[in-house]
Image (spheres, rainbow, N blue to C red):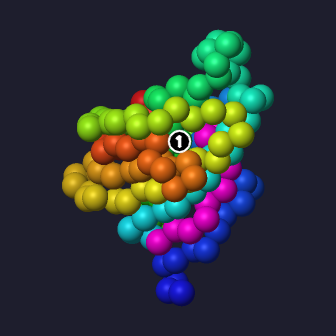
Amino acid sequence: MSDHEITSMDIHEILNHLPHRYPFMLVDRVISLEVGKEIVAVKNVSMNEPFFPGHFPYHPVMPGVLIIEAMAQAAAILSFKTMGTMPSDDSVYYFAGIDNARFKKPVSPGDQIILKVKIDRVLRGIWKYVGKAFVDDNVVAEAEMMCILKAIE
């Protein structure tokens, strides 16, 4: 294992590397992270999620946009680790774009989503990633994402 490879991060360390909090914290554990390259993280999907009562009461399904958001949060952890910084009150890590998003299978309560995100490139402060979300080794969603760290004015 290299100095730039992290074998895991628990929720306490994740909370230090993401500004998100309940009900919008969508990463429960980091399985592996290679600084400057890729992250593998976990989102455990529980019936207690705040969106299930309305999406849909008769057949609970995790909204696809939240699966993409979970991938973006994993990407943010990867970026902060790569930059060697932490989130702060004077900046926000924003989505700048989502391309080629595809939703392959529904995600239901009890599923565990494995989030795999790779840095595609960084150019002028814009980070581009390729992400895939898996349940039981099946791709449930994928997307190309762009994010940017912006100062709060």
Measured as percent of width and height from the top left, residue 18 is found at: 59, 47
Residue 12: x, y in percent?
74, 55
76 relative position to 17: left or right: left
Residue topped by disc 1? 70
Of 40 and 150, which appears nearest the observer?
A: 40
Image quarter (top left, top right, bottom left or bottom right) of the N terminus = bottom right
Quadrant showing the C terminus: top left
**Residue under the image location 41 percent in, 37 percent down:** 104
Residue drawn at x 57%, y 53% as measured from the top left: 136
Q: Main secondary structure of the magenta part?
A: strand
Q: Residue furthest right?
A: 48
Category of crowding for the residue at label 1, using alpha-carbon neighbours closer than 10 angstroms: few (below 14), some (14–19), many (at least 20): many
Nearer to me, 151 or 73? 73
- Locate residue 32 relative to residue 118 in the image: left or right: right
- In which image quadrant can residue 38 be found? bottom left
Q: Position of residue 96 (x, y in %)?
A: 31, 36
- Residue 55 on image: x %, y %: 60, 17
Position of residue 97 in the picture relative to residue 70 (left or right): left
What's the residue type where badge 1 is placed? Ala
Magenta stretch in the rendered image:
25-34
